[in-house]
Amino acid sequence: MLRALLSLLLVSVPVLAMAQSAVPDRADIEEAIRHYFAANDERDPKQLGLAFHPGTIMFWADAEGRLQSLDQNRWKARLADRAQVIPIARERRILWIDQSGDGASAEALSRFDDFQFRDYLTLLRIEGRWRIVGKVFVRQSLADAAADSKAADARGKQEIETLIRRKLAAMDANDGGLLASAYLPQAQTATLEDGELVAWPIAEWSARFDRDAAADIRPQGVERRIERIETAGNVGWARFTHHRSGGVVVDYALLVRSGGLWRIAHLDYLVARATPSP
């Protein structure tokens, strides 16, 4: 089964379709995100558990550009620790949702008195319920957020596009080392199998690529498209797709820039029957 899933990712074979319905599930996706909002505003670890898959790790870069991460157990402990001061947001909004079958992404905004958080999230419909499986975020002062320039945004998008093209080249060549260079070492890729979450570390994908390259196995006839890139400070999001014979694999990637370099922190891929709408 693992071999079959790898083949789907590499060549987009359309025979396994994960989308159960073409109707967007916006209300259910929003509900998962609002559980996340409530978890922080109400300091409620149970709400966090309703929003996130327990294996989710969030990533960000601190003020010095150093990579940081937080797992669910430590996050829940922070919420439960009443000695910690956690500010209440003045405003929380879901800015957009992008859905492909049983996978989705969203951008969320949380504003406080003098700063804001912007989140990029990925979600999967696991055993019938939408849950957040990936998160990156940036903290911005309101002054810095207002001063963000189009030039900086364009530069970040170009840098992310270059990174993704390196990843796609690695897929075409089955080059494990090149693939790994596009990801954080802690990164995981996730998908759904029979409605259940399946995830692998990037080191496993890299090893598989190198094994296939040694056996002279290369994907053939795949068209890969970068469809959308978003940035907010030193975090980003991208959707790209892999097409063959009428089938498509949709990738949602979350990225962080640390040490001046962009890397993929988390990636979900969804096997679908048809190309998603923009």
Image (cartoon, helix red, strand yellow):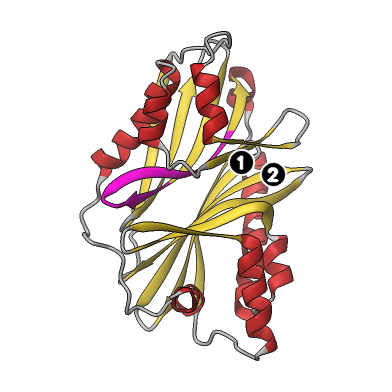
Indicate the quadrant where residue 100 lies: bottom left
Q: Secondary structure at mark 2?
A: strand
Q: Are marks 2 and 1 in contact (CB under 8 Å)?
A: yes
Relative to 20, say whether 26 is above or below. Answer: above
**Which residue is painted at 55% across and 21% down in the image?**
78
The foreground one among 237 and 182 is: 182
Tell me, yes or no, if residue 174 can be seen here: yes
**Which residue is painted at 53% across and 58% down in the image?**
189
Label 2, label 1: how many angstroms apart (C-alpha)? 6 Å
Question: Where is the C terminus found, in terms of image quarters?
Answer: bottom left
- Amino acid at dot 2: Arg
The foreground one among 108 and 174 is: 174
Question: Where is the N terminus found, in terms of image quarters?
Answer: bottom left
| Magenta segment boundaries in residue numbering | 123-137
Dot 1 alpha-carbon crowd within 10 angstroms: few under 14, some 14 to 19, many 20 or more: many
**Location of mark 2 (residue):** 257
Report the side of 219 relative to 246 (left or right): right
Let me know if residue 47 is in the magenta part.
Answer: no
Let me know if residue 134 is in the magenta part.
Answer: yes
**Location of mark 1 (residue):** 235
What is the number of the mark on residue 171?
Answer: none
Q: Secondary structure at mark 1?
A: strand
Residue 151, image x, y percentages:
66, 41
Residue 143, image x, y percentages:
62, 18
Report the side of 9 relative to 99 (left or right): right
The foreground one among 148 and 100 is: 100
Residue 204, image x, y percentages:
62, 66
Residue 202, image x, y percentages:
63, 61
- Amino acid at dot 1: Val
